[in-house]
Amino acid sequence: MEYVFHIAIMLNIYIMLVLSANLTTGMANLLTMCQAAFYGIGAYIGTFFLMQFHCPLVVIIAVVSLVTGLFSFVVSYASVKLKGDYFVLASMGFQLIVYTILYNWIPVTRGPYGIPGIPGIRLFGIWELSGVYAYFALSLVLAVVAILLFNNLHDSPYGRTLRAIKADELMVQSMGRNTLAAKAWAFFISAAVAGVAGVVYAAYVSYIDPTSFTLNESIFIISALFIGGIGNVKGPVFGALFVVLLPELLRFVGLPDAVAANLRQVIYGLSLILVVYFRPQGLFGKMVLK
Amino acid sequence: MLLEIKDIKMSFTSAHNETFNLLKGVDLGVEAGRITALVGGNGAGKTTLFNIITGFEKGYSGDVIFEGNNLNKISPHKISLMGIGRLFQGGQLLEGLTLMENMKVASDDETGERPFESLLKARKVKQKEVAKEAQARAVLERIFGTDSKYLQMLDTEASAFSYGEQRLLSLARLLMGGDRLLLLDEPTSGVNPVYIATIERIIREMVEKEGITVLLIEHNMQFVRKIADTCAYLDDGVISKVGPTAEVLDDKSVRNSYLGL
């Protein structure tokens, strides 16, 4: 039973990650390849505060959201100066820089040795969460909050402005809208939610190292988004379901682990190609990336 | 003058380090409450001049004065908020948005457009949204009549409208911004004669009923002759002729160099 709850926790974490990627990539048309960097920043910042100050849940979420969100300004500044493919490359550069720092700043991050023994998040500052059931409940609540939050953003006048920017940014500027501010907020919220997913992951597994926050992870998150669909909330949720549940389903086929791991990559790749070719808006998506 | 363009100079440097002077000192005054046409050959710099006025082009010298305010170094969205609207060349409705969303996004009221505003001030945002919807309906009724089919198509996605319809609706959308000056870049381009007549009517109503000033770029000389009070001819980087439309278009040098007559 614990196995099922473990999968559910990872699913909830990926729902937050893919939804956060959807705000920038799906709604504002800014394809970012650095969601895992924000996920990692959130995990490491959260770990620091959990280990040093044993912060309660509300405080840890607020601090991680704010700090991770502030890091997003590096990427949003790049989006002002760089467009299209150049911006994608810049976001990849940010991802690689964050990974390199996490890997090599050993006195602070312990680099490849990772950080073990991360204490659990304290609910109301008293009860320390531990075990799959507690983290399932926490991750479920946060995933539902993320779904409601992004649903509200999508349907709000702010979401409308982002979708308008996606269609024609210059035209939206000529209508008196500060598109740079709108995009900077999108990056901030996206990074903050990815950061919260990071701290939940860190507290749940009680060990982090940089290999969980690589460029591959960012590509994985974006792939989930494209498979599920961009521009709405249903698509990213389905994308997270697909990428988290697929490897688990392969376990029941009875293939050897080495074959199953490779087959999983093949299925991901093939799914992405088929979706992009036959249904560019994704299986449940609303829009096509321009 | 509502808008004054003073000694605008702009040059480009090619990849081979050759300098090309596109605008060599453009001077133009746009009178309030009138329709001014800016004509000239392809590549003369008309759209570049629009980009300069609306803040999208910054690498120029000279001054752009709107209602006494110098627009140099002001960002495009702030220029728009000062009361200058623009119809882009080939500009259509925003894809992926419905007609109503297109109208609302052009409103001069930005309430609710900051993230979380719709969560934190739900009631106020809802009221404003209702007001914007009413404004959008009123604009469409005023332009297309109370029995217009567009009033029944407010939730229709932009892509469902034809090119000509999108051009008409883009013009109508400009009225949501409460602008005092509209820059229209080739409003009749690619539009059939029936819609051209409607565009003419819409522009006239904007000027006569709403008191808006219009500066337009147009290659359709018949349309310019019918609609524009004043015409300015941009040639070789300067306004070489400006005056009443018929006078400019009938000028021998203009006919020679631009119309090839």
Image (cartoon, coloured by chain):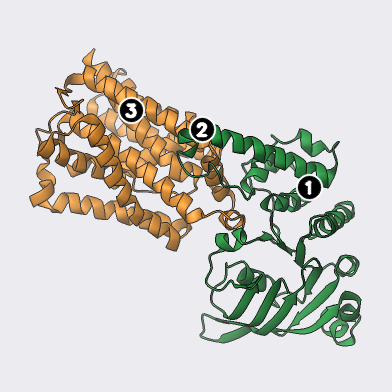
Distance (Cα) linking label 1 and label 3: 45 Å
Three-letter residue code for mark 1: Glu
| Residue density around tag 2, few if under 14, some if 14–19, many if 20 or more, within 10 Å | some
> Where on the picture, by quarter, is residue A44?
top left
Q: Quadrant of the N terminus of chain A?
A: top left
| Residue density around tag 1, few if under 14, some if 14–19, many if 20 or more, within 10 Å | some
A88 vs B194, left or right, is left
Kindly indicate which chain is depicted in green in the rendered structure: B
B40 vs A253, left or right, is right
Chain A is shown in which shade? orange
Q: Dot 3 corresponds to which residue?
A: A142
Residue at horizontal 81 percent and vertical 67 percent from the top? B35
Residue B10 pos. (x, y %): 59, 81
* Whether residue B31 is situated above or below residue A7 in the rendered picture: below
Chain designation of label 3: A
Distance (Cα) linking label 2 and label 3: 22 Å
Residue at horizontal 48 percent and vertical 28 percent from the top? A234
* Marking on residue B165: 1
Q: Which residue extends farthest top?
A: A1
CB within 8 Å, label 1 to label 2: no
- Determine if marks 1 and 2 fall on one subunit: yes
**Labels 1, 3: front one:** 3
Query: Which callout, 1 or 2, points at the residue further toward the start of the chain?
Result: 2
- Determine if marks 1 and 3 fall on one subunit: no
Residue A62 pos. (x, y %): 28, 38
Q: Dot 2 corresponds to which residue?
A: B122
